[in-house]
Amino acid sequence: MSEKRLLLGDEAVALGALYAGLSGVYAYPGTPSTEITEYIQQSPLARERGVRSRWCTNEKTAMEAALGMSYAGKRALVCMKHVGMNVCADAFVNAAVTGVKGGLVVLAADDPSMHSSQNEQDSRFYGRFAMVPILEPSCQQEAFDMVADAFALSESLRLPVLMRLVTRLAHSRAAVQIGAPLPQNAFDPDDERTRWVLLPGNAKRQYASLVAKQEEIGSRAGTSPRNTLSLGEKGGLGVIAAGIGHNYVREVLPAGVSVLKLSQYPLPASQVRSLAAHCGRILVVEDGQPFAEEQVRALLGPDYPVQGRLDGPLPRTGELTPDCVAAALGVGGAAPHAPALNLAARPPQLCQGCGHRDVYAALNRVVEEFPGARVFGDIGCYTLGALPPFRAIDSCVDMGASITMAKGAADAGLRPAIAVIGDSTFTHSGMTGLLDAVNDRSAITVIISDNLTTAMTGGQDSAGTHKYEAICLALGVEREHLHVVVPLPANMEEITRILREEIAYEGVSVIIPQRECMQTLGRKLRQKKQQS
């Protein structure tokens, strides 16, 4: 029976995966991808079918576990934000060499304009680098339908398939028509053992097989119903619209313009050439980096006029909007919304009562006593400590970098070198840095600010909750230089004393301020009140 549901793009992907016979979703929370896994965790169909949906420690463990489920013949989905592709790259690229058994779809949610990210990285480059098919929906309905296509394509080619969303599609809603769910794959482990063992002899054969598949992958994209060519006036403008860019083009498209809708890669070269032969020039509209534009320019040569994000008609940075697409198409109409006037800026800040506040208050008090001190921060809501009123951290680069940057600075002679890292980030990618520091007896002080959850992305489970003290001891931190404190104003004197003592220590010390996130605590109290 067919029905319509109002879904976020993320939710459309999640439901599409469940209806395509999903057996496991593997993910680490990261905006704008988080809602995919949360939807599956809350789905009655997922519970009924026993779909595995707990959060993973990081994106690499997620990718590897999904590959293991694929090995057993089941369909698996891996979800992450774009920077998570950097973390899982080793497993992702090598999964293209081993190939897959059950369908394996890697969902990367990119964040043009950096709404909640540290770069504007475009995940399509990873798909091209790994030489696997790439799918990019233009709307929520396509997001739902395309997941089933992706699983089928994965099993047909025996390769992982990369599916890319952007923030504006992931976090907007539309009506989605859904049908009947498919059954899950049967348990059927792969018997072709040599292709999974990437010793050089096997890897060379597997890589040759991957290269040999490129012609078929390109042919599939060239004949895909997801890539459609509509020809308008001869000699006029041609538009190549990728993913959500196609939605913006549809909103403002003038009559007579030819359009190639692009949703499956590699670039369909024959359709691009047909568009170019029919038109006098081409505009490439894509959200993110000029991934398709660069390939179109290379395909058509330097004498054919191709425009896009590289030469000015569309902005080089940030996400696209219907207004900027209309301007690039030379379409008049309503002016873009003017900015509101006389409104004070409201930068984000740590919640009132948050334990991170007390950590930074104590840290600032002590750091004032050490003029050369540097505090290396990390990725999480505690990164807001870089802003007023605290201005407490001096760096924030990537997940886990606080400890290793502090170590490197200490190796160079910087004293004191202090690292601030959150609980979920520590288990994600901070533990190995701490082991390096222990092995090198680096003079660093590490603060693991533990609020018992993954707070920045909405309060998901943190992999190491109630285990951090044991983890640090197991990594070799000395018992006398490991402290657990409760970050409250009443404990300020104790915390500052411990900080002073450990900063003076020429070795690795760890302080774990531990108090539950105010948001998750509030939700628990409200739920308890409703149940009473």
Image (cartoon, rainbow, N blue to C red):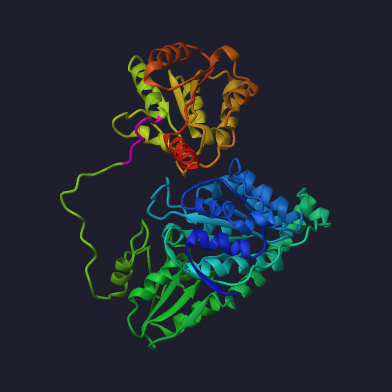
The residue closer to the viewer here, 278 or 262, is 262
Q: Measured along the vertical axis of the image, is residue 408 above or below residue 509?
A: below
Query: Is residue 126 at least partly visible in the picture?
Result: no
Most extreme residue toward the left is 342
Left or right, residue 111 beside residue 227: left
* Position of residue 303 measured from the top left corner of the image (x, y, whole percent): 41, 75
Residue located at (38% from left, 73% from top): 249
335 inside magenta stretch: no
Please state the extent of the stretch shown in magenta in the rendering: 348-354
Left or right, residue 398 beside residue 369: right
Most extreme residue toward the front is 532
Which image quadrant for residue 217? bottom right
Q: Main secondary structure of the magenta part?
A: loop
Q: Measured along the vertical axis of the image, is residue 271 above or below residue 370?
A: below
The residue closer to the viewer here, 193 or 182, is 182
* Position of residue 62 measured from the top left corner of the image (x, y, whole percent): 63, 47
- Quarter of the image containing the N terminus? bottom right
Left or right, residue 338 beside residue 487: left
Residue located at (31% from left, 70% from top): 328
Which image quadrant for residue 212? bottom right
Query: Is residue 241 at least partly visible in the picture?
Result: yes
* Position of residue 196 measured from the top left corner of the image (x, y, whole percent): 77, 52
Which image quadrant for residue 345? top left
Most extreme residue toward the bottom is 234
* Position of residue 82 measured from the top left corner of the image (x, y, whole percent): 50, 51
Residue located at (33% from left, 61% from top): 315
